[in-house]
Image: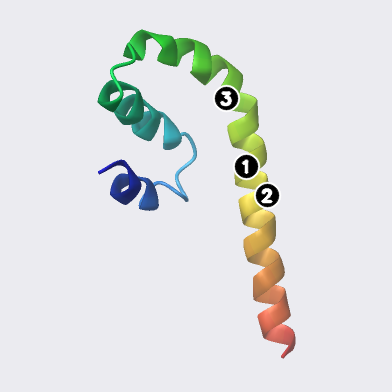
Amino acid sequence: MTVLSSIGTLGIPGGTYVILAMVLISVDIPAEGLALIIGIDCPLDMLRTAVNVTGDATVACMIDKK
């Protein structure tokens, strides 16, 4: 279930928090620890989004040149 739901959150900034909560609950880890993870993950999420957008733009430019 976690793999299937993660497919739809790739382009959503902050969408990983919902998936992370589901994963924590499915492996019997208290979801209260999610607040700590969100504080650490926020800057990393911004970087992942920037890399994703840059990669998509690069591929679009490469395909356009062909």
Residue drawn at x 62%, y 63% is: 56
Q: Position of residue 51 (x, y in %)?
A: 68, 49
Instruction: Answer above or below: position of 24 versus 55.
Output: above
Q: Is residue 6 left or right of residue 11?
A: left
Q: Are marks 2 and 1 in contact (CB under 8 Å)?
A: yes
Q: Which residue is mark 1?
A: 48
Q: Amino acid at mark 3?
A: Asp
- Going from N to C along the chain, the mark reached first, 3 or 1, is 3
Q: Residue at x 67, y 71 (%)?
A: 59
From this viewpoint, which residue is outermost toward the bottom? Answer: 66
What is the x, y in percent for residue 17?
41, 29
| The quarter of the displayed image where residue 29 is located | top left
Quadrant of the snapshot with the C terminus: bottom right
Q: Position of residue 65 (x, y in %)?
A: 74, 86
**Dividing the picture into quarters, in which one does residue 24 lie?**
top left
Judged from the image, the secondary structure of the residue bearing numbered disc 2 is helix
Residue placed furthest toward the front: 27
Q: Find numbered disc 3 in the image and state the secondary structure of the residue it sits on.
A: helix
Give the amino acid type for the residue marked by disc 2 in the picture.
Val
Crowding at dot 2, Cα within 10 Å, few <14 / some 14-19 / many 20+, comes out as: few
Q: Residues within 10 Å of mark 1 (few under 14, many from 20)?
A: few
Q: Residue at x 62, y 42 (%)?
A: 48
Left/right of residue 29 with respect to residue 10 in the rendered view: left
Up-down: is 32 above or below 10?
A: above
Pointer 2: what residue? Answer: 51
Mark 3 burial class by Cα count in 10 Å: few <14, some 14-19, many 20+: some
Residue at 51%, 17% in the rendered image: 37
Q: Which residue is mark 3?
A: 41
Secondary structure, mark 1, is helix
Specify the quadrant of the image occupied by residue 34.
top left
Residue 58 spot, x, y in % from top left: 71, 67
Q: Is residue 13 left or right of residue 65?
A: left
